[in-house]
Image (cartoon, rainbow, N blue to C red):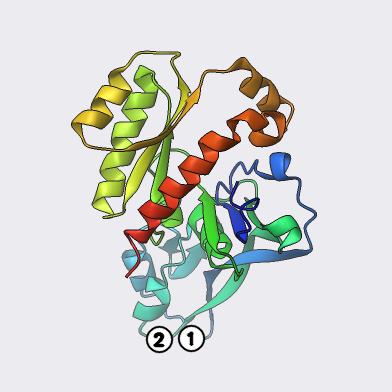
Amino acid sequence: TAAAAGKRVCYRDCDVEEPNGHLFLKPQFSRRRPVSTPVPEVIRERCNGCGLCAEVCTYNAIAVVHSEVLIFPELCHSCHACRMFCPEGAIAERPRPIGILASRTGAGGVSFVQGILDIGQIAAPTVIRAVASEPVEADLDIRDCPPGVSCPVIEAVKDVDAVLLVTEPTPFGLNDLVLAVEMTRALHLPFAVILNRAGMGNDETETYCRREEIPIILSIPDDRRIARAYAEGTPFLEALPDYRGLFDECLERILTLTEARRP
């Protein structure tokens, strides 16, 4: 909708553990680069085996056994504490690849940035940070976030102008929405709700939003044609152009919401 209105749009898929935006937008990536994170490496000739590095490591990524320093890179969160506190300066850092960043700039008015976390890695926020910071000129910058309220979600939304919380009118949807609202309020971010599959459940979600004075800026009906388009990997408005007016109105409300955040 935004691209059709003549705006430069950047779509960033921050769900780096399971990105799926490419299934719908079908980008031809023009750039790929590895994403790495620094992990400690012991300079043996300087180390006296004091064990302070293991003591300051919150994530148990370092152990010292008989003055021998053992490092477990998979547990490291790259906090740099071991290097900073080592009294002998015996800790260096080396980059360890953990994922891939792929991007395409400007084709059809939409730029696309995607991160993919390597299998078995745990440092999703590092890859999300790379996706979010990739320089792209855009009038509207959209981040597709992972589900839940864990560290990857917070990394993706912490510096945005506004948050859209997508939910559905079911007990599970309401439970997750309440958690997401609490997180967003803790981050002091403007937010609104998109109600997906409206009409298929109960009205408790809408009642909650009214009580908490949370605007519902879009209600998407429980339309089987939408599910069919999704299953086929076809963009919503391409398959069902009669919904465009609804999304045009939603875009205007989103832009109003983001303006509330900007100085």
Q: Quadrant of the C terminus?
A: bottom left
Left or right, residue 172 beside residue 33: left
Which one is in front, 226 or 7?
7
Helix, strand or loop status at disc 1:
loop
Callouts 1 and 2 close, C-beta under 8 Å: yes
Residue at the spot 46% in from the left edge and 54% down from the top edge: 156
Vertical position of residue 248 compared to residue 116: above or below = above
Residue 23 badge: none
Which one is in front, 32 or 57?
32
Is residue 72 visible to us here? no
Q: Which percent across, then down, holds residue 159?
A: 39, 62
Q: Which percent across, then down, holds residue 188?
A: 26, 55
Q: Which percent across, then down, holds residue 95?
A: 60, 71
Residue at the spot 36% in from the left edge and 52% down from the top edge: 257
In this figure, which residue is indicated by the disc labeled 1?
A: 46
Left or right, residue 134 beside residue 82: right
Vertical position of residue 78 compared to residue 258: above or below = below
Which one is in front, 225 or 125?
225
Q: Amino acid at mark 2?
A: Glu
In this figure, which residue is indicated by the disc labeled 2?
A: 88
Q: Name the quadrant containing residue 112.
A: bottom right
Vertical position of residue 3 compared to residue 204: above or below = below
Sequence order check, earlier mark of 1 and 2: 1
Q: Amino acid at mark 1?
A: Arg
Left or right, residue 135 beside residue 61: right
Is residue 68 visible to us here? yes
Badge 2: residue crowd in 10 Å (few <14, some 14–19, many ≥20): few
Badge 1: residue crowd in 10 Å (few <14, some 14–19, many ≥20): few
